[in-house]
Amino acid sequence: MKVYGPVLMGMLLALAGCGREQPPAAPPSEAAAESPPAIAAMGREVPILAFGDSLFAGYGLKSDESYPARLEAALRARGINARIANAGVSGNTTADGLARLAFTLDGQKAPPALALVELGANDMLRALPPAQARANLDAILAELGKRKIPVVLMGMLAPPNLGADYRRQFDTIYPALAKKHGAVLVPFFMQAVAGKPALVQPDHLHPTAQGIDEIVSATVDAVAGALPPNHHNE
């Protein structure tokens, strides 16, 4: 599995500390200065739940620049009348996510046709046991499975400084759980911006609006393909 070394570590370091205060929104990049054009709704609305940490919450970005917002626009451009609920909470660990999952699901206006799960980086950055993160993610996917909600699991990679053993245990969590629960796997959610300083904010950690667009471009196929057949181009 490809490792991104110091760049990966730099991009992830602040995730564990962004649960308390949001910084002022970073100025939008030139590529993000204009919002995507509005697209008329087509067919029945497709509810999607984006369940994660600051990378979903849109840390340092405007609300319409977050990953869920930009992904929604990309899906609608494909004729999918997506409506994505952004349930990203900055600083969340897998334990935090598990604790609020049922409440979040019960609070949706309609059962999600798909759930996007992006958690685990904060566990790793706090050096929490990989077995604990695995158990929490396993429980999250099991609950979504009980509710018959298909999942796209956004994977993360541990940086080299945590040691080979920790990396081996952590990095194998996502492919193993995706296989166990039949989830669609995005092996490394941040791959599109790793090693590209121009696509991260001045903190060198979170993606810029342009970086979010690159991540959306790299993952929209996986998300669209994970939707149940009756939710395509309705």
Image (spheres, rainbow, N blue to C red):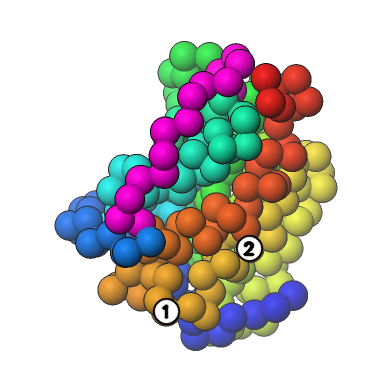
- Pinpoint residue 139: horizontal percent, then vertical percent: 64, 37
Task: Work out how far the residue at label 2 is from the one at label 1, CA to CA, in angstroms.
Answer: 17 Å
Q: Which residues are magenta?
A: 32-48
Q: Is residue 111 visible?
A: no
Q: Which mark is residue 62?
A: none
Read off the residue under disc 2.
188
Q: Name the image quarter holding residue 35.
A: top left
- Pinpoint residue 17: horizontal percent, then vertical percent: 32, 62
Horizontal relation, residue 124 to residue 135: left or right: left
**Comparing labels 2 and 1, the label whose residue is closer to the camera:** 1
Read off the residue under disc 1.
197
User: Taking 165 as reference, is 44 above or below it?
Assistant: above
Q: Residue at x 69, y 26 (%)?
A: 233
Q: Is residue 72 visible?
A: yes
78 or 164, which lies in front?
78
Q: Residue at x 35, y 56 (%)?
A: 32
Is the stretch drawn in magenta largely helix, strand or loop?
loop
Q: Name the image quarter holding residue 76.
A: top right
**Type of amino acid under label 1:** Pro
First reached walking from the N terminus: tag 2 or tag 1: 2
- Pinpoint residue 2: horizontal percent, then vertical percent: 70, 78
User: Taking 157 as reference, is 175 above or below it?
Assistant: above
Q: Secondary structure at mark 1?
A: helix
